[in-house]
Image (tube, coloured by chain):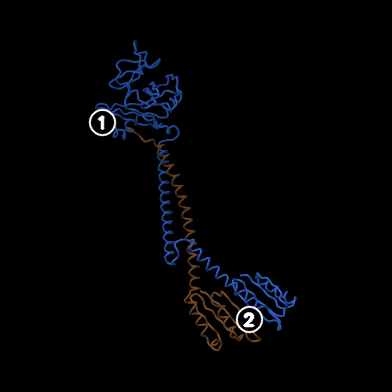
Amino acid sequence: MSLTFKQAQQNIYLDSMTNVDFDPQVKYNIILSPHLYWVKKLSLPLKNAKEVKKVAHTLFEESLPEDVSYSYEVYKKDEDFFVFAYDDAQILALIEEKGIAFANIAAVYFAQSELDVLEGVYRVNDTEALQVKEGVVVLLPSAWFDELKILDIEGIKLSKHRLKLQHFSNFIEKNSLNKIMIALALIVVLLLVELFIYKHQVTLLAQEKENIFSKYHLKPTMMQNRAILEHYTRKNGQQQKLREALISLLQSYLKNSQKIESIEYSNSLLKVSISNVNAQDKNRIVALLHKKKIDFTTKMQGSNLLVEVKL
Amino acid sequence: MNRVNPLHIVALLLVLILFLLFQISSVKKELTNTADSLHQSKAIALKTVAYKELYNKEKVKKALERILRQPSLKNAEIIVQRSKDRLTIKAKSLSFGTLNSLMSKIFNGAYTISRLSIKRIDAEHASLQMEIKW
């Protein structure tokens, strides 16, 4: 068993005098009064509605006001084309004025496409009546007729000739929208180019990195390479410090009676023993080593001064 | 006839722009990381190569042999012990001149001194024990 929910639908004939008791649970099929569109029934040497639509604006060139942006719709019936021009903004404004939420609109139709099968004259409001003349649905003053039929709007079987209202036309013109679309498309192209350039640069850099690895015979991972460099740096640093510390000690001015008795270096510890050193001489040697920024400790072994440098 | 709402196209283009901006931002980060990694690799490679060249086993061996063959050490009683990874120089008594000459050359070269012992014997001589690794 399948569960489907179908919202109730209602047909309404829309003109300025229509009263709508809006129900949010209902979807509305709106049939536009002929007041809300221009229609031409034409026999043209063109194959289909699509081709006619391309030239539709030229068919209304002299009959429509120039300051309004119109949309066009075409459908073919028998051998004739029905060409429509309508103002989206005007229709949308009227729908809004009647209190119908746009979300509750099921579809919008022209009276022409839905009521062209009517026979006789039908009352649509207090002052107007509908009649089909030579296949075209027209509005006439109801006062012209003695007897008017009542239009059963709910009983109408709707056609496939729906029109799509362009909401954007309320606040933006088609031309402007086209310009915006072109501008956005250009931005997209520029961004794509930028993205391509960046990706290409990433590829080039990755390739260069690979070349460096193979040229200098580096290990596969940076961690291994860092460890190797660290080993060499530590080794080199220690040897530099050993040399600097020894040179500093050997260059310290000793008195004639003072001699370097021994120099020992192993396990990163340098020991230098200087003979015949008194407290005053010790201070002088210590001050000199401090000046050379060497990290050391001293201790006296009898008259010998033992200087220890941890490398 | 179905007509594509231009607003949908605009919305699609805007989404596409946002997506591309996000992609560009990611690729920019990737580019920065790759460039950093490249610079680091280059620096590490150059330093490592320089150190390898400096502490090259064969070069160190040859240079040490050259030092030990110099005329000033010919008359000195120096014992040289060679093993796979090190060289040990021992001398019970060296004149300060000879010792000075030897140590100057060792200190000025890139030799890894792992052990050193110099002890003064008298006013003009000292004993030497030195181990150099490679």
Crowdedness near tag 2: few (<14), some (14–19) or many (≥20) residues, C-alpha within 10 Å? some
Image mark 2: chain = B
What hue represents chain A? blue
Against A101, is B132 above or below?
below
- Label 2: which residue? B119
Amino acid on which the number 2 mark rests in the picture: Lys
Q: Could you tell me which residue is drawn at 42 percent across and 51 percent down?
A: A195
| One can see residue B90 in this view | yes
Task: Give the Cα distance between marks 1 and 2.
Answer: 120 Å
Whole-percent x, y for residue A310 in the image: 63, 70
Against A35, is B119 above or below?
below
What hue represents chain B? brown
Q: Nearer the viewer, residue A27 or A166?
A: A27
Q: Quadrant of residue B72?
A: bottom right
Q: Nearer the viewer, residue A302 or A42?
A: A302
Against B57, is A147 above or below?
above
Query: Residue reaching furthest bottom?
Result: B75
Whole-percent x, y for residue A123 in the image: 36, 15
Q: Nearer the viewer, residue A104 or A135?
A: A104
| One can see residue A112 in this view | no
Q: Could you tell me which residue is drawn at 42 percent across and 21 percent down?
A: A16
Residue at disc 2, secondary structure: strand
Image mark 1: chain = A
Whole-percent x, y for residue A129 in the image: 36, 16
Amino acid on which the number 1 mark rests in the picture: Leu
Mark nearest the camera among 1 and 2 is 2
Q: Quadrant of residue A292?
A: bottom right
Tell whether label 2 touches label 1 (CB within 8 Å).
no
Crowdedness near tag 1: few (<14), some (14–19) or many (≥20) residues, C-alpha within 10 Å? few
